[in-house]
Amino acid sequence: MSHDAVISPPLFKLSLVARPGIAIRLLNSSLHEIDRSTESLHTEQPEGLYLVEWSSAGRRSQTMVRLDARNDGTEIAFDPSDMESDATLEPNANEKAQLVNAISTAIEPSPYSSVVVIVSAGENASVDMRDLDVRLFDRNDVAMRMTSEAAPFLELSPRERAYRYQIKPGRYYIGFKSLLGEKLGQSVPAFVGRQTLVFLTVAATRLIVADGEKFNEETSIGVDPVKTTVITIRGDEDNYRVRERVRLAGMLLYDLANRTNSLSNDVVSVLDDSLTDPLLRLYGSLVALSSFERGDISLSGNDALGEVAATSGQSWIQRIDRWIGNPGQPGLPTDALAACWELARLAPGAFGEEARMAWPSRIETPPMLECTWRWAIEESVGRPEAVRGTAIVAATARSSGGTSPWLCWRQSATKARSIPGNMKSDLSLLVSEVAQKTSVLIEADQTKPRVVRGLESLAPDVQTTALRSLQLGPPHADRGGAADITQMAIALGLPYTQLRKRLARTNKALDVAVASLNIGNDRAAPPSLILLDAPGLSRRVQDREDPQKGRFGGERWQAGFELSAEFDQTNSRSWSRIVLRVVGPGDDGDEVQFHLHDSFKPPLVVRRIKNRSTTLTVTAWGGFTVGVWIPAKAVELELDLASLEFAPEIVRLR
């Protein structure tokens, strides 16, 4: 390692602007997310290539941008019309109608509950449906067994596939390979005596993939989650009613994705019917609540909602309450409970204590839709116990976004167990501490550029949290109250407990960075400099669900060193304690880098050799590949934990 002072590279302004409802993601040359936002994103980054992803209402596009000294600032304004593409493989309206007819004709009434997943691809989609890895899981990540008569008497084209699961009523989630090559999860309900129909659409896009120091453009085919439609049927409805249900669901879901309102008199009359699909009524309640939340309509007045005749605010409260249904009903998604919380906030006093006591007290599985996830986060700020920190909820907090109106998460984001944060300190005080330390780093960036690299040396999620805290902390002494904390939690997509843990981790990372200000040499160099030393990180990611696989040589033995793993039980059958051990001819003090799954924060942990060995203990929800780099010996090691025969079942199968 060089002992020359580290020079902070110059930063260049980048402004990304889009229309309302368009999600923006900024990725670096290694395709690691730097920041995300909606409508606009303003940042400063070092010279280099960056990838911008734009997505909204079923369409997606990418833009590559280079920042360098030729321009002081770069601004990109994105027009949604750019998302029109011949590569979209959504079946046309006639084909979809024929598919709905086939499905509704084939399914008969049943006293049981079931989920039928229907996957459709366009004529030009060259995809093996098995590659999409469509499966149904329960809340503990256990894969459900598909019914042998997958969909009886159902005649589908070669471009369509149906999967049928007869299951107990409850809350489940479907897993699938997405358009971007990630395996995503999405909640779906199962009601008593009803059959849930999930329509998935296969689409294609062009992806820019990092390969060493260059980029390759490739075609990626997978499920486009923003085009999904979910309804339920009894099985005895006429085909035209099922077709109309699919159409209405698509219209209401479009409203939720684009902040519009289609609640006309005709639509409201359908939703007022108690025999209407409970999911369709739930979608309508969310559209109405979203309109009230935006301030388009006042619950306390006699305003009309869309084309609906003027109705008193109290009538709308009662109507939305009926549409939501009983949030404790078996199988009803947790969206219903989050909607009740939002309705109670918008109309204080509308529900008595007795009514509130009848509601479930918390959610343990993610809702189906992004808006209800936002409302659940808001509830958790006042009642931290409202959102339980299960593995699947933690995965949603780590990885959701960009699939509006649906809430999807990366299935592999469940791997790492959350590290307990400081649960005793006042959250406002914690935000203030983070803000103060962030200010010190920003000032040091300007006054001591040869000593510290500042915020850019920290992980992207730490940077984002630090900057958000800066907006609430000093000199903004009048901010940092409950409302500001709520906005911060919503902006970061983190329920209260996850927000506190993120702030605690950010605070700790800032402590290390600020301490380095007193040392004017590279011995205090931040971890990002170490990351650059690992040659495996410059190699192409072969498996986005297991990012280290194949990047560290593929061997657990090398040059006398060995990487091994031991497994131990925890107080939960769903988690496994893993002891990673490196043994070999290293000198005391030699650095050993453990590169973990990217759901671990941070994904790089450094240990030092003592008496020819070193260990790292982690707790995980499933298996993943570990990469090790020993700089002093230029040795790479790699171990796929799921491939070990003696590994617990939850490690081998997840």
Image (tube, helix red, strand yellow):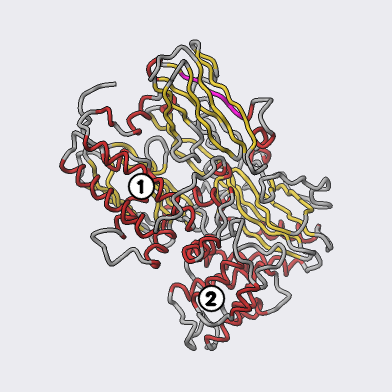
Verify whether residue 193 appears in magenta. Answer: no
Verify whether residue 638 appears in magenta. Answer: yes
Distance between the Cα atoms at labels 1 and 2?
Answer: 34 Å
N-term mark: 1 or 2 = 2
Please state which amino acid type lies under the numbered disc 2: Ala
Instruction: Quickly name the residue at label 2.
Output: 344
Task: Give the x, y percent position of residue 260.
Answer: 48, 70
Q: Residue at the spot x=56%, y=57% of the render? A: 406
Q: Quadrant of the C terminus?
A: top right
Task: Give the x, y percent position of residue 442.
Answer: 23, 46
Q: Quadrant of residue 516?
A: top left
Q: In this view, does 1 lie to the left or right of 180?
A: left
Q: Quadrant of residue 525?
A: top left
Q: What stretch is highlighted in magenta?
A: 636-641
Q: In this view, does 13 lie above or below 486?
A: above
Task: Give the x, y percent position of residue 392.
Answer: 59, 49
Q: Is mark 2 on a helix, strand or loop?
A: helix
Task: Give the x, y percent position of residue 508.
Answer: 37, 43
Instruction: Quickly name the residue at label 1.
Output: 507
Residue closer to the observer: 183 or 491 = 491
Q: In this view, does 169 lie above or below 27?
A: below
Q: Is residue 556 above or below residue 595?
A: above
Q: In this view, does 521 lie to the left or right of 398?
A: left
